Amino acid sequence: MTFEMPNFLPALPEMFVLGMVCLILILDLFLSERTRVVTYLLAQSTLVGAFILSLSLYSSATELSFSDTFVLDPMASLLKLVVYAAVSMVFVYSHGYLRARNMFRGEFFVLGLFGVLGMMILISAHSFLTVYLGLELLSLSLYAMVALQRDNRVASEAAMKYFVLGAMASAMLLYGMSMLYGVTGTLDLAGISAAVAGGEIDNTLLMFGMVFLIVGIAFKLGAVPFHMWVPDVYHGAPTAVTLYLSTAPKLAAFAMLMRLLVDGLGGLQAQWHDILVLLSVLSLAIGNIVAIAQGNIKRMLAYSGISHAGFIILGVIAGSPEGYAAGMFYAIVYVIMGLGGFGMVILMSRAGFEADRLEDFKGLNERSPWFALMMLFIMFSMAGVPPFIGFWAKLTVIQAVVSADLVWLAVLAVIFSVIGAFYYLRIIKLMYFDKAESSEKLKPGADFGAVLSANALAILALGAFPGALMAVCRQAMGV
């Protein structure tokens, strides 16, 4: 047997990120508290460099490497670019928050970049091995980030809960993979798809394996009934970590959903379709209804995220390239809105005070009319009010479901979307019609204020011209 040298070019961004993380890890040991900003700047430089490399490799062609375990296709390239941009914004929003709480340490940025590397591997996975490698690298980074505030009992409890439930979900995913390997004899997603299409394998084991895979995917997406960790972890983790946890990893979870079910088990669409319908309906119902009862904005946004996961799944349920493009479009839009929402929570916080109660937003218009307007844009978009981008995201997913002759499901989605609008509009009511509990003016740093304003204005601008982003998503899905 001869060893064939793999083509390293498709994985150049991953290798660059890994090299930079190792460099930052070593350099951070020699930095003092005063010079720790170097770690932050190097982390941002890593994301910029990875963005440039991925952009240069962007192509409509599909390339396989590392014995067909790694794939670079338009979907992978687009999702990676959004991940870099999202994590870069997370770092901008977080560094002031971390400084005020004596948490401005290299661990946050190193773990954040390791998480990015895990997401990149997961997005480009073409084998069960790379799926699991990327998932575990991402998950282990997130567990440690949630526990970053070691002296905080609530954060430690959230980290333990996330770790235990995450380990159970990973075990179920691994069990499903082992079953599918047992019946197909391969770990390659294309090989599994071909074996399923052949129809000559044990259908019972195939079904069991598929169900265990869906459990693992649903846990990562935070879909009901595998959502129990979401509100507690979002609430217990430091807000900077919640911001990271609630945004970019959702893109990796969407990629895992596409790789495992669409690419690997596309021949079983009739079977996994019904399970996804149930997950989506439960997520839409419980996410929107329970969010109404929340008095903590981080828990409210957690249940909101659960309902948005239901919408993302709707696109995959449609079972067509147009539906998959709509699901990807929704996932990207949700990340943009989530960045703005949790960015506003960080803006309102200060040393010794977490602005995580709904009442903390009372009278925000009196304290800062500009940022009250930015929050209004974000909340209107999450509620699906035109002309903001959230409206178009919901519309494209619902259209895809209607095209698949699932009109009843589209009607349910609209009903729960209307119910969900209540808790978003409640924030706007508090900002504009209630008396402020504090007269202190908001004074964000120049970079924070500029990025948060650009984030919220992008929600409006993309809503005014949604065609460009949708066209990119459609092209990535080969529509």
Image (spheres, rainbow, N blue to C red):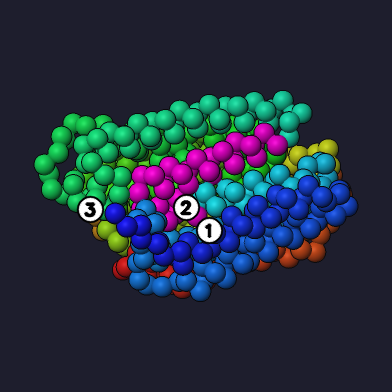
- State yes or no: discs 2 and 1 in contact (Cβ < 8 Å): yes
> What kind of element bears circle 3?
loop
Q: Mark 1 near mark 3, Cβ–Cβ under 8 Å?
A: no
Q: Mark 2, mark 3: which one is toward the viewer?
A: 2
* Observer-nearest of 468 and 420: 468
CB contact under 8 Å: marks 2 and 3: no
> Label 2, on which residue?
121
Q: Position of residue 375 (x, y in %)?
A: 66, 55
The residue located at (36%, 60%) in the rendering is 4
* Residue 256 rendering spot, x and y as whole percentages: 40, 48
Q: CA distance from mark 2 to mark 3?
A: 35 Å
Give left or right: position of 233 versus 369: left
Extent of the magenta region: 120-148
Residue at image coords 47%, 52%: 121
Taking depth in this image into account, of 395 and 225 the one nearest to the observer is: 225
Tell us which disc is closer to us: 1 or 3.
1
Where residue 249 appears, x then y in whole percent?
52, 48
Counting other residues with Cα less than 10 Å from the Cα at mark 3, is it few (<14), some (14-19), or many (20 or more)? few
Confirm whether residue 397 shows in the render: no
Disc 3 target residue: 405
* Residue bearing mark 1: 14
Figure check: 67 above or below 149: below
Is residue 210 found left or right of 386 in the rendered image? left
